[in-house]
Amino acid sequence: MTINLIFRIGAVGILVSVLCQILKHSGREEQAFLTSLAGLLLVLYWVIPYIYELFETIRDLFAL
């Protein structure tokens, strides 16, 4: 995992939180929810290959 991934996750978190606050104060709670959901899915899309690699490494370590 590179440090760039951590910075990207942080940037998405900041951007999503600002957008959610703006949308909530303007009365668009549904769009704020969808924005936070989209941010979560984007971060999961980036992190899932590393989780898969972790489980593969653990499986190889215990030779299951």
Image (tube, grey):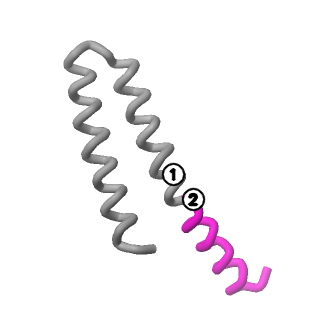
Classified by dominant secondary structure, the portion drawn in magenta counts as helix
Label 2 environment density (alpha carbons within 10 Å; few <14, some 14–19, many ≥20) = few
Segment colored magenta: 48-64
Q: How far from the left and from the top, in percent, is residue 42?
A: 47, 47
Residue shown at 35%/64% (left/top)?
6
Secondary structure at badge 2 equals helix
Q: Are marks 1 and 2 in contact (CB under 8 Å)?
A: yes
Q: How far from the left and from the top, in percent, is residue 44?
A: 51, 51
| Residue that carries the numbered disc 2 in the rendered image | 48
User: Residue most toward the top?
Assistant: 27
- Left/right placement of residue 47 relative to residue 22 reads right
Q: Please, what is the three-letter code of the amino acid marked with disc 2?
A: Ile
Label 1 environment density (alpha carbons within 10 Å; few <14, some 14–19, many ≥20) = few
Determine whether 47 is above or below 4 in the image. Answer: above
Residue shown at 27%/42% (left/top)?
15
| Residue that carries the numbered disc 1 in the rendered image | 44
Q: How far apart are the alpha carbons under marks 1 and 2?
A: 6 Å
The answer to whether residue 54 is magenta is yes
